[in-house]
Every structure is written in structure tokens, then in C-alpha cells.
Image (spheres, coloured by chain):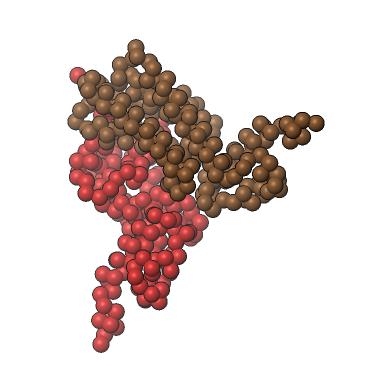
Chain colours: A red, B brown
Amino acid sequence: MSDRARRGRPGHDQQTVLRVAIELFNRQGYDATSMGDLARELGLTKSAIYHHVPSKESLLERALDEALDELSAALDRVQADTDATPAQRLRLAVRTSVVVLAEHLPAVTLLLRVRGNTPAEKNALSRRRDIDHRLAEMVREAAAAGEIRTDVDPLLASRLLFGTVNSMTEWLRGDVDVERLADAVATLAFDGLLRRE
Amino acid sequence: MSDRARRGRPGHDQQTVLRVAIELFNRQGYDATSMGDLARELGLTKSAIYHHVPSKESLLERALDEALDELSAALDRVQADTDATPAQRLRLAVRTSVVVLAEHLPAVTLLLRVRGNTPAEKNALSRRRDIDHRLAEMVREAAAAGEIRTDVDPLLASRLLFGTVNSMTEWLRGDVDVERLADAVATLAFDGLLRRE
């Protein structure tokens, strides 16, 4: 019997372990969650879990990479769209951030709670800062192009814009029309709440 | 010697204990903070602390009440302004929420992290929900008055609006021009990021 067959479907099982781990980390905190808790939640023995994953930190790492890889790839796609104006690219960046957040909600929620105690967390914080810098740079470009208001500091505008997006982890639950949600967020952010005559 | 004189200046000392407790709760989490940690941080004995406050939960309660009382009182003032239109009141509510958040940053930060494990936390969550309902109602009134856009659901607009304000606890530090900040947040929220011709 091959090693793969003996383990059942390891690909599937690793995904299940990761999903449940992210859910536990979000519910009770990463530090407060043990591999024993995870085993109990999965109805497995601890040694069965170590069959799939080497350590708790490797689960955290994979969860944070999931969120960061998706956000980076989305920004890459937006920035490659050189036909769009800077403000159009920024609007796309807002939309696509909402979509990534909604489609990878548990992983993004975990990412936004990271405070940086372990190497995996420090690395994730550093990657998150890079993404924030890219977004702030997009706001500056749109301001320099005269497309967005310049009476609000671009760094402040960038923080508020993506603070709005990130705040959605506080209340967003599955089963949402992601595209409509992304449109609503972009509309409010760019066009404002006031009704125009 | 009166009880008061024997204890030194209890009013002052209680405030110091509360400030340091809030700072510790925010830094390492309420559950993970012991009265022993607080004593060490203050350079006091544990019994000296119990001289000032009956329990850890009473410190949490006072911190959460500080944030909630300020937010409620600010909303009361805004809603009493019946000369203003619904959208003007909503704009004032956004401005004043920013001011309260900036001026009571540690207490508001603690409030926004509460997850509701103890009676004090459950009570705070219930008061916070009441405030959220009042804000959502103000958005609905402004929509009904035709002053704000109706193509975005008022509940969603309300969540995004105050999600933006609350997200400021992630990066705001002291030494900020609070009134300018409140103006910038209200301008972006109501008028949008786009430059108008």
C-alpha cells in the first residue's frame, strides 16, 4: 500500500486541519490554542495531526500566507492594468480587497489580528506593511494625477480607505453577494454618502 | 486621621491604577492580565492595589463605562440638535465619534476588543449594540429624508461608516489635531475621495 493511500487523502485532510485551525485561532486566539485543542475539535489524536502538519506555527504560517498571497496577487493584477488611470486602479484595488477579504474571510481575519510575537507573525506583519505601502503609493499617485481630493493627506486617506475594508471582518459572514458588496464599498469611498443632485 | 488622608489621594491613585490597567489590558489582553501583573507594572504590592479597587473586573467595567458613557453622551448631544437635518446630525455623529475615540483612545480600543466572556463584557457589548442601533437609525433617517444615497443599504452604510471610525484605533496615536482629523473623516465619508470639478 502506498504511503499516500495509507494516509487516506492527505491533501483533503490537510485542508480540513487548516480550516479548523484557523477557525480555532480566530475564536480563542493563536497563543491560547494548543495542538491538543485542535485534535479534540477534529476528533483526531494528536499524533494523527502531526501526521499532517509539523507544528502549530506551520498552520499559522500557511493561514497568513493564504491571505497575504491572495492580497498581493490581487494588487499585482490591478497594478498591471496600465490602461486605467491611477484613480481607476485605486478603485479596483479597493474592490478587489473587498473580494479577497470576503472570499478568504477566516484567513484575512487572522492576519488582521496578528500582533507579531513569533517569527511567522513578524514575517506576516512585514508583508502586510509592504501591501499597505503599495496601497498608500496608489493613493499618492491618484492625488498627484489630480483625480482625488488633495485636502486630505494621502496617507490618512489610505489608512481610512483600507481601515474601512478591514473593519468588515467584524461583521461580515458567509453567504454574501461579494460583487455587490465590493461595488457598495467602492461607491461610498469614492463618491461619498451624500446624494448628488 | 481621616480614612481619606490615610490613603493618600485616592482619587488620583485610582485614576493612575485605571490608566495603567487599561494600557496592560490592551497590550496583553484582559484574560491574560493578572492583578499581580498590574501591581508589578505600578511598583505596588497586590494588597495596595486592592486598597484602591475591589477586583480586576471592576477595572474593566470602569474602563468600558468610560468609553460607553462618552459615546452615549456625544450621541445625546447630536440628537438633541433638532435644528439640524438628519444628514447634518449624522455628519456630526461621525465627527463626534472620531473626537471621543481620539480623546479616550485606550478605553475605546479596549471596548472594541471586548468579546463578551464576563458579565462586564456582556453588559458592554449590549450597550455597544444600542449605540450601533442608534447610529444605524440616524443613517435610515437621512436616507428617508432623501439627503444621502439610497443605492447602498442603510445598515451597510452605517457599518462601513462606523467601521471606518473604529478602524482608527489600529494606527491612531496621541498628539493629533483631533478637530482636523474629525473633519477629514467626515469629508471623506460624506463627500467621497474623488475630486469634484
Q: Relative to A25, does residue B57 appear above or below in the rendering?
A: above
Q: In which quadrant of the rendered image does the C terminus of chain B lie?
A: top left
Q: Quadrant of the N terminus of chain B?
A: top right
Residue B156 appearing in the image: yes
- Residue furthest to the right in view is B1
Residue B22, x across and y down, in percent: 56, 41
Residue sitting at x 36%, y 41%: A167
Residue occupying the point 42% across, 65% down: A37
Residue depicted at x 59% and y 51%: B34
At a point 19% along the width and 41% down the height, the residue shown is A180
B104 to the left or right of B93: right
B19 in relation to A71, above or below: above
Decide which of B63, A85 is in the foreground and name it.
B63
User: What x and y, as percent, mark residue A157?
Assistant: 37, 33
Observer-nearest of A19 and A160: A19
Q: Position of residue B44 (x, y in %)?
A: 70, 46
